[in-house]
Each structure stands twice: as structure tokens, then as C-alpha cells.
Image: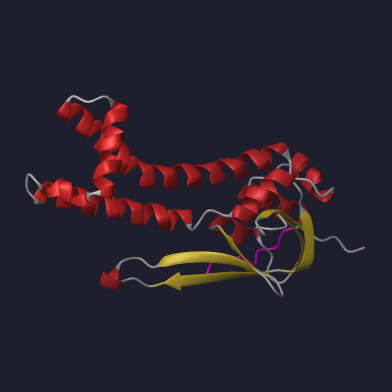
Amino acid sequence: MAIETDRWRNQEQVLTDLSKAFGFSTTSLEANRTGKLSAKQWSSMFGRFIKTVISTAAWIIGPFGLWSILIAYNRGLSLPSAVQTIFSLAVHPKEMFTDGWMKPAFCIVATLACLGVGFLRASRISFGLYFDLLERAVVLKEGRVEGREEQIFRAGGRDPIERYFFDTKDERFIVNLQAYRAIEQGAAYRLYLLPRSRALVAIEPRVAG
């Protein structure tokens, strides 16, 4: 269902609503106007980036760490010896089935499932964002912006998934509901982006002249 967003607001009110939606302050916006990413914005973007990296590593490395701990406990080995045992079993998987097949089969399936999730998360790591965070530069894009809403209907009568976007002439940016409600449809804006990842860090109404 479309959301009503056409109540009249002056440009200051629009900017206030957008700053709340994107979490940028007046200080951050001033830095963006000079082509720089503010320290607060950098910290927020880095936190999201490193969170993805850590969760990816946890899904990929975690199963091997868990099996190493279990082997060390059950066989009375040191942790380094248990890790060596894991690598030995990975190279010679037939050794896992000498005492039966159910437990080894469960371990293999669970490990493959974790690796699958890990590699899926790894595909979401933006190396463009990594280099943007190193450079800390912001580029300006000006133009008219339209807010878009899309619904993805799900089986079983469950509530649809709603997604929101800002569309310019040649680019689309995923935004949250608060940002979608904050925009004035079709108005001209100044968008501040990271150059490689094209992440939208701030936006303000464009003042005539």
C-alpha cells in the first residue's frame, strides 16, 4: 500500500527529516559539502563493513573451530593437535567413517551448510566500500529524486516484504521507510555518495541559485 508523503514542508523540515533517516548531522553534512566523509559517518560505515566481514569469517571458520574443540575434549588432545587432526580428516575423509557413518555425515552436512552461508555472506562484502573507507572521499550528484516502493508477495498469506528506493535519472539507491517518507517526490536534491560503492551517505534539498 502506498504511503502518503505529499504534506507540505519547507526545505529545512525536509532536511531535518532526511538527516534523521540517514543519521547525518550538520557537521557531517558540512564535511560532505567539502568532499569528505565525516568521522562519525566513517565510523558508522566501517562498523557495518566489519560486521559483515566478521559474520562471514564466523560462518566459514566457526565449524572447524567447533570440531577442533570437540576433538580436543573427546580425545584429550591439545587444541593445536586437534586442529591438525581436522586438517588430516579433511585431506583423508575416509578416516572419518571408521567408527560409523551417521556422526561424520552430520558433521559434513553441517559444515557444508555453514560454508554455504559463509560464502553467501562473503558475496555481500563490498571491496569498493573498503577502498572508499580508506580514501574517505565523497562525491556530489545533483538531480531530481523520486521515491519508489516495491512489494514482494510471499506464499501462505504472509505479509509482503516492502522495499524502498530513491530513483534518479540513472541510478537507484536502497533506502529505509523513514527516508522514503522524508523525500519530496520529484524535487531537486544534492546527493553525497562514496565514489566506488555508490553508497548514499547524505542528501539535502537543492537550493535554487
Percent of width and height locating residue 103:
12, 47
Q: Quadrant of residue 175?
A: bottom right
Q: Is residue 207 magenta?
A: no
Dominant secondary structure of the magenta stretch?
Answer: loop
Question: Who is closer to the viewer here, 164 or 83?
Answer: 83
Q: Nearer the viewer, residue 132 or 190?
A: 132
On screen, residue 38 versus residue 93, left or right, reads right
Instruction: Check if residue 3 falls in the magenta segment.
Output: yes
Q: Is residue 111 left or right of residue 6?
A: left
Seen at 55% across and 57% down, the residue is 176
Task: Name the spot of residue 105 as percent of width and height, x first.
Answer: 16, 52
Visible residue check, residue 1: no
Image coloring type = secondary structure
Q: Position of residue 26 (x, y in %)?
A: 76, 42
Q: Position of residue 122 (x, y in %)?
A: 47, 54
Taking the image as shown, residue 47 lies to the left or right of residue 151, namely right
Q: Residue visible at 48% across and 58% down?
A: 123
Where, by quadrant of the figure, is residue 7 drawn?
bottom right
Residue appearing at x 35%, y 57% in the figure: 116
Q: Residue at x 63, y 38 (%)?
A: 43
Instruction: Report which quarter residue 133 is drawn in.
Output: top right
> Which residue is at the front of the view, 149 or 91?
91
Image quarter where the C terminus lies is: bottom right
The answer to whether residue 37 is seen in the rendering is: yes
Identify whether 55 is placed above or below 191: above
Q: Which residues are magenta?
A: 1-9
